Amino acid sequence: MPAAPAPRPRTVLVTGAARRLGRAIALHLAGAGWQVAVHYRSSQQDALDTVAACAALGPASAHFAADFEDEAAARALLPRVLEHFGAVDAVVNSASLFEHDDVHTFSYPALARHLASNTGAPIVLAQALHAHLLARAEAGEAEAQGVVVNLLDQKLWNQNPDFLSYTLSKAALEAAGTMLALALAPRCRVVGVAPGLTLTSHLLSQERFAQLHALSPLGRSSTPEDIASAVRFALDNRALTGTTLLVDGGQHLMRFERDFSLM
């Protein structure tokens, strides 16, 4: 008898995968055998570098640009990935707009931009993945299953007045995760992963970052590898949906008066 064809590699779209945490997630999943669609907004060279690194670790990778403040661009993204790879099994929503405002500087435009990028786009991508899974099931793939993983933030459980629009957009995404888990079952699971302080930025020196990273019950917050492995766990565990994994060394259990970047 002829040998059975090899199973199709699973394909994941990782948004914001050109740099920082999204890149770490993309590389981790590529190393676990996933085909990775690398989304980016404007960092094309970084996206190309991520694609090359993913392709060296896993079966295949490709890059796709989209500005998530543009609804049409967000809605067109998954069909473009499908055109390239043929099927998609998961979406990891890592892309995030993170601009500072507070109650004194809050504006409608700032809130609208954060909601579009951080809440609207993940919902649109979950909607598109579910429609794709239903189409596969109708075409005879009875076990067509998918997963959406939304990157949240431990500060939802430990709020402070900084980054008001960003925090509201992530709170809305956390609430949407519950509703989507109910609406898209049983074809599509929806899981949140909430990091603690994971990477430094231009707002923090390396020394200050190390000090803040240690402020947790475990004496360490999350690393990019911690978050990437939690995302992989969420993708693989078929009993998880409608919940959030807080991967932060317990930082959400402590009280912080300001955002880490402003401490």
Image (tube, helix red, strand yellow):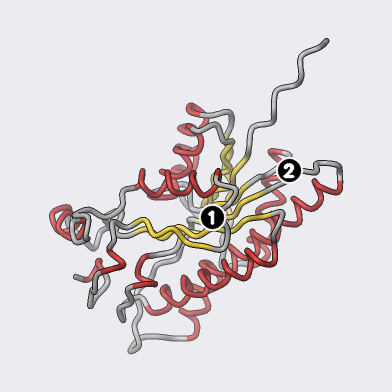
The extreme front residue here reads: 239
Residue at x 49%, y 45% (from the top left corner): 233
Which mark is in front, 2 or 1?
1
**N-terminal label among 2 and 1:** 2
| Figure check: 255 above or below 55 | below
Residue at x 52%, y 51% (from the top left corner): 40
| Figure check: 252 above or below 27 | below
179 vs 27, nearest the viewer: 179
Q: Answer left or right for 123 relative to 44.
A: right
Q: Which residue matches tag 2? A: 83
Q: Looking at the picture, how far across and down is residue 70, in whole percent?
A: 61, 67
Q: Answer left or right for 246 relative to 237.
A: left
Q: Looking at the picture, how far across and down is residue 49, in whole percent?
A: 45, 37
Q: Looking at the picture, how far across and down is residue 178, in whole percent?
A: 58, 69
Return the mark for residue 97.
Answer: none
| Figure check: 169 above or below 10 | below
Crowd band around label 1 with a 10 angstrom C-alpha radius: few (<14), some (14–19), many (20+): many
Residue at x 56%, y 63% (from the top left corner): 242
Which quarter of the image is occupied by the C terminus? bottom left
Crowd band around label 2 with a 10 angstrom C-alpha radius: few (<14), some (14–19), many (20+): few
Kind of residue indicated by mark 2: Glu
Q: Looking at the picture, how far across and down is residue 177, in whole percent?
A: 57, 66
The extreme right residue here reads: 139
Q: Which element is circle 2 on?
A: helix
Quarter residue 126 falls in: bottom right
Q: Which element is circle 1 on?
A: strand
Which quarter of the image is occupied by the N terminus? top right
Cα–Cα span, label 2 and label 1: 22 Å
34 vs 54, nearest the viewer: 34
47 vs 259, nearest the viewer: 259
Q: Which residue matches tag 1? A: 149
